[in-house]
Amino acid sequence: MPLLPETNNLGFDRENMVKMRDVCKTYAGGVVALDHFSLDVRRGEVLVIIGPSGAGKSTLLRCLNGLELIDSGSIVIDGIPLDKNEANQLAIRRKIGMVFQSFNLFPHLSVQENINLAQRLVQKKSPAQANTITRDLLHRVGVLDKAMRYPDELSGGQQQRVAIARALALYPKIMLFDEATSALDPEMIGEVLDVMRNLAAEGMTMLVVSHEMGFAREVSDRVVFMEEGRKVEEAASAKFFTQPQQARTREFLSQIL
Amino acid sequence: MAFVSPRTISKAATLRDSILFVLSLAAMLWLVLRGAGQMGYSWHWQRVPGYLFTLEEGRFIAGPLLQGLGMTLAITSISMVVAGLIGLLTALLRLSASPVGRGLSRIYLEIIRNTPLLVQIFCFYFIMAPILDIGRMTTAVLALSLFEGAYASEIFRAGILSIHRGQWEACHSLGLTRWQGYRHVILPQAIRRIMPPLTSQAISLIKDSSLVSTIAVYELTMQGRAIIADTYLSFEIWAVVACIYLVLTVSLSILANTLKRRVHGAT
């Protein structure tokens, strides 16, 4: 008999970090963003989600950390169900780090203060404790020399690396990347992808919405192709790019590759 | 090439504008003097300083006008703080998820913005003050704070709504509570943005404070009226009172501008 049951009635699952079942989400105005969508993400897995715009990719990520409320279905993150219980919602938000297309750094705070803020408010760390973690993270993403600067004094690539450091400062178990490189000038995409690549190598569970097919092929374990809120195809990344099963997937790949 | 640098143009324009400005001032002064002359008004400027202050044995003694100024400063500064708090609270209530909060703040706004300030002051003085057993000064502060607070709340609301949604989403994803998001991220940015309209509102408050002279609060305008009732120095005293208000409001704008330049990220 295994020491821990594979699942209990809370839906705890040793294997899966994310468990979505039959999730539906329709926006006011009738746009269907997720249509009975189910997805499991294993611990340490890097999952890339691709699809045309309006496919529901961003909505998928935003539902996971409660930025959007789902209409029906269930989401369980690291054993905690995402439901009406506010304590559960908060616990889930604190397990998940999110990186946005438009960085969303706080413009009135310096880089260091941006990263310290949630450590101080959410984790109640002392300024010294927070500073140590912040400086270590800034070093890891290569912008330690900008610690005292303000976001508008940084390039887009630097801002996005700071945003990643800000999310990592809370030691999340899952990182969500919502088109993290789409707003960047081409020469800055590489530096952000490098940071993401290192993170994947360290074993972080990552859900990445991206148009960077090179990154998807090289770094991800699995690729999901979505359209109109549904999963069209899902496969290990090597197989996905070399032997796509669905005609629609082949068509999409031929358009963007 | 016959290009004229912008600096040269602006210098010439500045000179021309300055001359026009001096000429307009001179014309206005001439009109006033001519009007006074036709009325047979006799000027007594030498009596005015005595109403501002007197020196007795080298000791400075504030006259009624400076005492009135002190009262005006006291009323407006307290009202500014209270109006700011009321404005912020009302704005937060209007943006909250609670229907009761939204409803109450809406009713408050509509009542205040759709009735004259003078009527509100009278209502407070003749109805609320006896019920609550409060003095004239408190009544004045309360009426002015509630009036300006309604306008301030609209400024706060617009400022809060002008902050990009992504800032809220970042707060949310970092696990901040709604209040922490307001306190540390949204309000610091919003307040920088709304400094100019908030300053205008504070200037309105200074000017509107003259209306509490109607309930016999001895602020600047009331002192002016009292002196004129005794002395008939209406031209001199009103001119001096107006100048004192002008100095107050202009200093406030300058102060606000200096503050705005000092903080980072003010856009």
Image: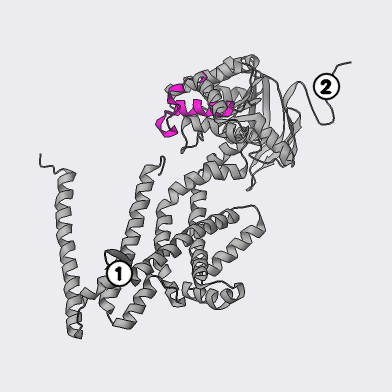
Q: Do labels 2 and 1 share a chain?
A: no
Query: Would you say residue A115 is visible in this rendering?
Result: yes
Helix, strand or loop under label 1: helix
Q: What stretch is highlighted in magenta?
A: A140-168
Give the quarter of the figure containing the N terminus of chain B: top left
Chain letter of disc 1 in the image: B
For residue A16, what is the image quadrant?
A: top right
Residue at the spot 67% in from the left edge and 24% down from the top edge: A233
Q: Mark 1 points at which residue?
A: B52
Instruction: Work out whether B149 lies above or below A194.
Output: below
x, y percent for residue A168: 58, 26
Q: Residue B175 in the image: x percent, y percent?
A: 63, 36
Q: Label 2: few (<14), some or many (≥20) within 10 Å?
A: few
Residue B31 position by quadrant: bottom left
Q: Nearer the viewer, residue A102 or A89?
A: A89
Looking at the image, residue B210 lies above or below residue A16: below
Amino acid marked by disc 2: Glu
Q: Report the amino acid beneath label 1.
A: Leu
Q: Please say if B217 is above or below A104.
A: below
Residue B95 appears left or right of B67:
right
Q: Residue at x 50, y 54 (%)?
A: B156
Crowd band around label 1 with a 10 angstrom C-alpha radius: few (<14), some (14–19), many (20+):
some
